[in-house]
Amino acid sequence: MEFQNFLKFEEIKKEELSFAFRQYYDFKEQYEDFILFFRIGEFYETYFKDAFILSDILGVNLTKRKFNHQGFAPMAGIPYRSLNSAIQKLLKSNLKIAVVNQTDEKDENGKCIRKIERIYTKGTVFENQFLNAKENNYLASIYNLKNGLELCYADISTGDAYITKGTVNEIQNELARINPSELLILNDGSINPEIYSIYKYELLDEKFLTQSNLAESKAFSLVYNYSNHILDKFKIEFGEIKFYDVKNLVSIDFYTRKNLEITKNILNNSEFGSLVWAIDKCKTKMGKRKLLSMITSPLFNKNEIEKRQNAIQTLIENKNECEKLAELISTTGDILRLTSKISNGTIKEEDFIVLKECFLNVNSTNNILKKLKIELLEKFEFNCTNLEDFAEILDKTFDTNEKGTFIKNGANAELDLLLSQKEEILNKIKLYEKELKEKTKINSIKILEKKGSLLIELPTTATNPIGADFRLVKKTKTVQKFTTDELIELEEFLASTNYKIEQVKENLLLNLINFTKELNNDIRNYAKKIALLDCFISNVELTKEFNLKKPKITNNEFKIEKGSHIVLNNLIKNYEKLNLDFDFSNLILLTGKNGSGKSTLLKQIATTVILAQAGFFVPCKNFEFPLFDKLFAVSNVTDDFINKKSTHQMQIKQVAYCIENMTNKSLVLFDEIGKNTSYKDGISILFGIIKYLIQNKCAKTIISTHFLGIFELLDEYENKINFLQILNENKREVIKGVSNESKGIETLKEENIPNEIIKYSMEAYSL
């Protein structure tokens, strides 16, 4: 195909186009940066640049369509039934989509009028097929307050919105935590969007700042107005708009989150092997999202942490009740994401079945929780009786079978009557078919229904005489189709009855939707209660499996007695536990030969702190710790090819960020600083960092290193450093002192390096 001969959109003259393509032209001008799906018959077609993108991402054939007398436009299309799967793939590529559909409206010349049916962007979708069940889907915005930034983020699928204020670094760390699908920035030059280029961002003009009466927040206005602009007729209802202080959370930067593998492993960026993967025993999708939120936002608030600990302790002490609760909530569907469908009226029959199954157990669940009196779960207020009564209504209304969800007999008298009438008509059709077979002596004769039409079908090979009232409608090589006056009358009765049935169903569902909207706040609060309960039960089950313990918050003492890495507990049977008991008033320098577990120990300490400050029990016999306001971990550094920064530069960049932002309440973990440059440069850099940290008493710091020569430089600071080493010959343990062992060359043998290389390496080592 000669791509160079294709027309370009900017070359098109609107007045020279057909009526249909003039409509396309108007839509594309309005939605220039969207993939525009244009409905033509049974297909959605894309043209010009959109066609190339669609062909590339979906792998569909690139073809052409005559656009006007000048020539052809590139075209790529999909069957209308494939729209959702296409949208799903395009959203993953951070593209925006506009869908144009045919309507029943006609212009003065009888031409079909088309309209925008729906706009899709990654941050505004609410349908389950476009969302990850385990993660929130946040639409975020930032607004410059001159003395800092305001951040708002909302999950359209649940109706939750959050607002906070902070410094540039604090807001960047919050964005790293929530990982928004879409970020909104006001296009007034007050914020440099390049800083946030790792996210899909939209530049908005000031019309999106129109104040909402829901919250006095410019950042919220951007989210609210943009989402309503995109979703248009789909009403957005925000169930909770929560203001919070970032200083009540542990600040964790983007690189630290990545290095500690909190939500994704470094190897292939999947959930397997991450901290979230290791602790997730939740039974509901709502619980999984809540758990992710809790573990990615540990608390810097002793009172709130202890409330969570008390909730878990209560469930542990009431084993039977806990097990019963686990059983009851295991059947709970994702009703929190149904609240958005309820508010915008897109809830379906099958969604009502999910609600029914959830609320049949609401009274039993609530009675157990009333008995347990868990403070954090008592704040969610909802009318238990209303929800239980609602479940009974749904149970009397809907049922399911292999064909899907249907309305039960007895749910609506008018509908029952119409269905009975339809059954009579269908029986008359069967009787008429039987009469035709007897009359014509053609046993293969059939009456078939297709798209509301009834036709008599018989093979073209049939030679038996048929009645004069048979009128031929269609003939092929194999079959011929007829109609008769009697069949037309039956068809009209059937069509009329079907129409009335659909109208009654539509009205029944509309009334049910409106009734459900009145319960939406109760549904949302119950869902949130179940999600939080699910997280607590998950930690209880983890506690039973790995013998976790309740951590103790101290003023400054830091002690880990028989502690282990929660991820390795899941991966390695009988993973060995370590004791750590040291004075955190001094900087800690950790040594040990290759493979002894220095890096693992640093991650173990960090993940244990994260678990503890998230309010969960931890994998230790005893864990005592001071609250940390910030957590920094520099390890697993790679180069930044795009910005032309080497591995060493990236490591130093992360160290610089830590030193600039740490406080005396922070926890800092440095893993082999300086290893990516020459020995002399590396050891000198490490010495400079250690001296600076000692003199400025910046933070509680643990540094691992292979630079044994560093200890000769630190003689004068010996009383200000705790020297620890990991031994792993017979039994792994952490003791005081400095390890002078290495395992670099020995590793060559373990990894099957050619013997010649090992020989040459040992010769050089002995020089």
Image (cartoon, helix red, strand yellow):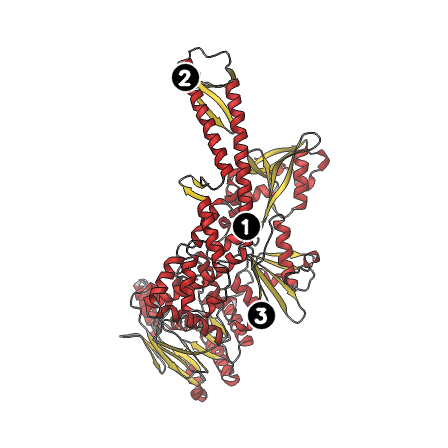
As measured in the structure, the alpha-carbon distance from the residue carrying label 1 to the one carrying label 2 is 51 Å
Mark 1 secondary-structure assignment: helix
Residue in view at x 40 percent, y 69 percent: 312
Please state the horizontal and vertical placement of residue 217, each as a whole percent of the image.
Answer: 65, 64
Who comes first in sequence, dot 1 or dot 2? Answer: 2
The foreground one among 71 and 241 is 241
User: What's the residue type where badge 1 is placed?
Assistant: Phe
Q: Measured along the vertical axis of the image, is residue 243 above or below residue 104?
A: below
Please state the horizontal and vertical placement of residue 580, each as a whole percent of the image.
Answer: 37, 79
Task: Specify the label residue 437 is tagged with.
Answer: 2
As measured in the structure, the alpha-carbon distance from the residue carrying label 3 to the one carrying label 1 is 46 Å
Label 2 or label 3, whichever lies nearer to me, is: 2
Residue 460 shows in this picture: yes
Residue in view at x 46 percent, y 25 percent: 448
Q: Measured along the vertical axis of the image, is residue 732 above or below residue 70?
A: below
The foreground one among 328 and 748 is 328
Please state the horizontal and vertical placement of residue 452, each as a whole percent of the image.
Answer: 52, 28
Task: Name the residue carrying label 3.
Answer: 169
Task: Name the residue carrying label 1.
Answer: 515
User: What's the residue type where badge 3 is placed?
Assistant: Asn
Residue 562, picture quadrant: bottom left
Quadrant that contains the N terminus: top right
Mark 3 secondary-structure assignment: helix
Please state the horizontal and vertical placement of residue 222, each as a whole percent of the image.
Answer: 64, 59
Who comes first in sequence, dot 3 or dot 1? Answer: 3
Q: Measured along the vertical axis of the image, is residue 699 above or below residue 252?
A: below
As measured in the structure, the alpha-carbon distance from the residue carrying label 2 to the one carrying label 3 is 82 Å
Residue 79 shows in this picture: no
